Image (spheres, helix red, strand yellow):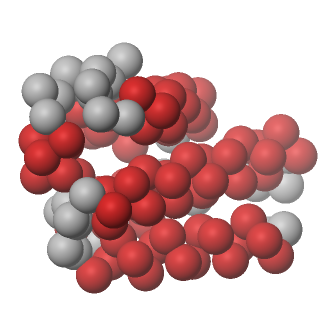
Amino acid sequence: MVTLALDPKIAGDLDAIANLLERYDAHSAARFCSRLRARYDSVAALVTEMDTNEYWGGAGSLADQGLCVSPLPDDPAFLRARREFWDHIAKVGEYLLSQGASNPRVRMWVDVFRKWCADGI
């Protein structure tokens, strides 16, 4: 579990993302789970790690790939899990933005995920 003195709630969101990746997206889990569960000594260290295109960029990024493909794309449990992923990653993005993240794709993905969740996609 991520340890942050300033906002422990974000640790729960990062851990939930890792759990969902392990359950539904082995490729992304292998790439990201150890870093999602890493111990960051400061919020600045977390922002430095996550304010990158690897997390928020285009094809291949966590935001782009995470829970986008499933062997059973119409499975109601998977669809709920994907919405949960979107909600948690949007919360992480909002937190990063509140802490000075500068990658413009963070805002873009937060807005997209919030819209998809609101629209019930």
Q: x, y percentage for residue 43?
A: 19, 41
Nearest the eye: 35 or 12 = 12
Residue 84: percent from left, percent from top: 68, 46
Count of numbered marks = 0
Instruction: Identify the image quadrant of the C terminus.
Output: bottom right
- 48 vs 41: above or below: below
Query: Residue at position x 89%, y 46% from top?
Result: 76
Q: Is residue 30 visible?
A: no
Which is nearer the eye, 51 or 121? 51
Residue 113 falls in image quadrant:
bottom right
Residue ID at (46%, 73%): 109
Location of residue 58 with respect to 62 vertically, above or below: below
Q: Is residue 21 above or below residue 108?
A: above
From the top left corner, tell me how far across and down residue 52 is, in percent: 18, 63
Compared across the picture, whether 67 is left or right of 6 comes to right
Residue 23 visible: yes
Front position in the image: 42 or 104: 42
Query: Which residue appears farthest toward the top when viewing the image?
Result: 1
Q: Is residue 48 left or right of residue 36?
A: left
The answer to which quarter of the image holds residue 55 is bottom left
- In the foreground, 64 or 95: 95
Query: Residue 116 at x, y = what percent?
Result: 70, 73
Quadrant, the N terminus: top left
Which residue does the image show at 28% across and 72% down from the upper left?
A: 57
Farthest front residue? 6
Residue at left offset 85%, top offset 55%: 74
